[in-house]
Structures are given as C-alpha cells and as structure tokens.
Image: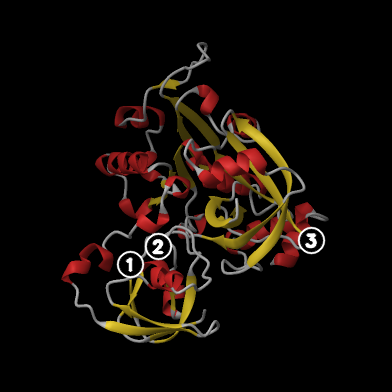
Amino acid sequence: MLTEITKAAQSPVTAIDRLAESGTWESIPASWSSAEKKALVCIRAVEETHDVKSFFFAGFDGQPFSFEPGQFVTLALNIDGQLVDRCYTISSPPTRPHTFSITVKRVPSGKVSNWLHDNLRPGEKVEAYGPSGAFTPTVAPNATKYLYLSAGSGVTPLMSMLRAGMDLGLDRDIVFMHSARTPLDIVFRRQLDAALLRTDRLQVYHICEGVGEEPEWTGSIGRLTQPLLEQLVPDFREREAFTCGPAGYLQSVKEMLKQGGHDPARYHQESFNFDAAEHESLHFPGSSTDTAANLPATSFVIRLARSGKTFSLDGAKSILAAAKREGAKVASSCSQGMCGTCKTSIVEGTVDMKHNGGIRQREIDRGMCLICCSTPTSDVVLDL
C-alpha cells in the first residue's frame, strides 16, 4: 500500500483510483509507529489567522509518511532545556505523503504553542513520535453522508478528512459546520471556499459569535443551536457526525444531536487541549485515581523489560506516574488515556485500564495497554 501511495506522485490517476476502489486508503499500514521517535525538518510555516499557524514537515530519510486522516503526532521538544511532549492533529491528508502539516493555535498561557509560533522556522529540526489516534473515517467505513462539526482549532482533523476524500474523488456528501469567534478567526476559511468550487457535494457553514472587524459578514451570528442545525441541515439525522473542539462545545453538540434524534452510534468526537494543561495534575475519568481512598494499598512489582528498571507500585497509582518518578524515559503526552503515546505491550501480568479512546480494541486483544491510565492488578512486566 505504501508503494501505491509513493507511485501516486508519479502516476496519480491510476494509483489513486486503485486506492479509492479498494477502500483501504484510510487504513494504510504505518511505517512510522506511535512509539518511534523520528527526526523531522520544518519546510514551511503558514499563517492561517492572526493566532494560528500551519507548520509543514518532511523526514530526513526521504520516506513517505503513512497515517489516517484525523490522527495526530506527538512532538518531542526541548524548550529552554526542558523536554516537553505535545500532541497535534495532522491537518494535511495522507494522499500527499511526502510531507505533513500540523496547525497550531497560539494559547496565551501555552508554553509549547507560543514556542512553536515564535521559534519554529523552515530549516529547523524537531523530533516527533508517529501517528496515533482512532478519530478517523475508518470507524464508519460504509457511510456516504457526513456532518463535520468543529470549533476553533478543532477544525484540523476534519480538514484532513475532507482533503483526503477530495483528493481521491470519493463520492461523499459532506456538510462542514465550523464555529469561530469572528470571521477573522475562521481557520482554513480560504481553503474551504476553494473546496466549494471543486465539488457540489460539499456544503460549508461558518457560525461566528460576532462580526469583529468584518461588519459586512453575512453568515450566521451567534452559536450553533438546535433550530439553526434543523434549518441548515434538515437531514442531519441521516449523517455520520464527526465533531472536534473544546469540551464545552462537544458537550453541547452531543446533547443537541441526541435531542434531535440523531443515532448516538453514528456520533464520533475528539478533544485535545494539552497545551494549557498541567499534565501531572490530570487524572482519567472513572479510573482508580478517582477512588484511590477506597482501594486497598496492595503493592505490586513493575519491571520494564528493556531498561531493566524495577519498582514497586500500589494498585491505586498509574504505572506511568510511577515510572517517571523512578527516572524511566517513557514516551507520553496527554496522561489521560487519549493520545496513545504511552502505548506498550504487557509481557507478563494484568492491569486495570480506563482509557479515553487512545487505544483500539484489537490492540488491547493483542496485550497492549496505555500505562498513563493503567494500574496494576498483579506483578507486571512491560516491553519498555
């Protein structure tokens, strides 16, 4: 499959046709795993809005990248002598495999987003862990009608999905609804306008809280509401819904769709806000850290097979937190069971894992876990 994508650059029509007909373009085997750190070079930086930039990367090895639209990578950065990992969704499509882009909003208190905006220039080298995440069109392989709902920088995974489908000429009926503060805050506004000229199967609606510095704005003003959704997308109940944005937006949209009679099984969401988070203070909903006071302090032995580190851990603590306290070098980012960066194989033993979508059932069946949201239920040996 990677060979077919590479050939697409030389023979785009035949290679892309084969990929589209096979229906497997969205689940291409990865050559760069989520646990592998790779050196990248920034080749371009583009201002999308006054506080949003897209950064384009290429690999030093010249190999094409393979990922699913909607996935993310984890940047491993050295900022003022401190090692920091952050997850960013890939905004470019897998159909343009020799480069990829991330799109980053500057967060006022965000250490990483500010550093990227102020320091990352073409020619600069960074390192990143490979693509991960399950928020992809593969969760609905037979869908033909889609509803993309985004707010702020949550537009990025949906943009990757849209671009990939259009590159392949897939016959998809898509309604793209994006919410922003003002028209000047609409990320990918020009690109979405251009996409409308390429197909009659796409509808785009921007909903802005206010007009800001564009008083001639003729689009919707306010916030997405049930009546507005019914008015603009009367067939929304028939569509596969993909939603990404801040937590409050996701909660509102999910409830809106549910009350409107949309099938919850056809609703898919993603939310990342790691840049503003103090990871060490976060815990995962429903995990043993929520009820640690009610758990017996049973101690288990954790052994990291590759590094040789061994330490004790009671059943109320996450393996990741303990491993870091012991000085183990373990790739991680969200600490919430969402990103998949800390995914590893269990060689021996059992764990209790409460994840938030960062690992797939088939990976769990193969004996893998996310150590950020796993607590031991026996002595454990991990492939770390």
Left or right: residue 106 versus residue 9 is left
The residue lying at 31 percent from left, 39 percent from top is 252
The residue lying at 48 percent from left, 79 percent from top is 345
Q: Is residue 229 above or below residue 243?
A: above
Residue pointed to by mark 2 = 337
* Residue 373: percent from left, percent from top: 37, 67
Q: Is residue 101 above or below residue 151?
A: below
* Observer-nearest of 38 and 165: 38
Q: Secondary structure at mark 2?
A: loop
Q: Is residue 78 above or below residue 324?
A: above
Left or right: residue 96 versus residue 7 is left
The residue lying at 55 percent from left, 36 percent from top is 202
Residue pointed to by mark 1 = 354
Three-letter amino acid code at the position of disc 2: Gly
The answer to whether marks 1 and 2 mark residues whose Cβ atoms lie closer than 8 Å is yes
What crowding class fits label 3: few (fewer than 14 Cα within 10 Å), some (14-19), or many (20 or more)? few
* Observer-nearest of 152 and 230: 152
* Observer-nearest of 96 and 359: 359
The answer to whether marks 3 and 2 mark residues whose Cβ atoms lie closer than 8 Å is no
Q: Earlier in the sequence, mark 1 or mark 2?
A: 2
Residue pointed to by mark 3 = 62
Left or right: residue 157 versus residue 325 is right
Label 1, label 2: how many angstroms apart (C-alpha)? 7 Å
Label 1, label 3: how many angstroms apart (C-alpha)? 38 Å
The answer to whether marks 1 and 3 mark residues whose Cβ atoms lie closer than 8 Å is no
Locate the N terminus by quadrant: bottom right
* Residue 168: percent from left, percent from top: 66, 50
* Residue 148: percent from left, percent from top: 46, 41
Three-letter amino acid code at the position of disc 3: Gly
Asked whether residue 268 is in view, the answer is: yes
Disc on res. 118:
none
Label 3, label 2: how many angstroms apart (C-alpha)? 32 Å
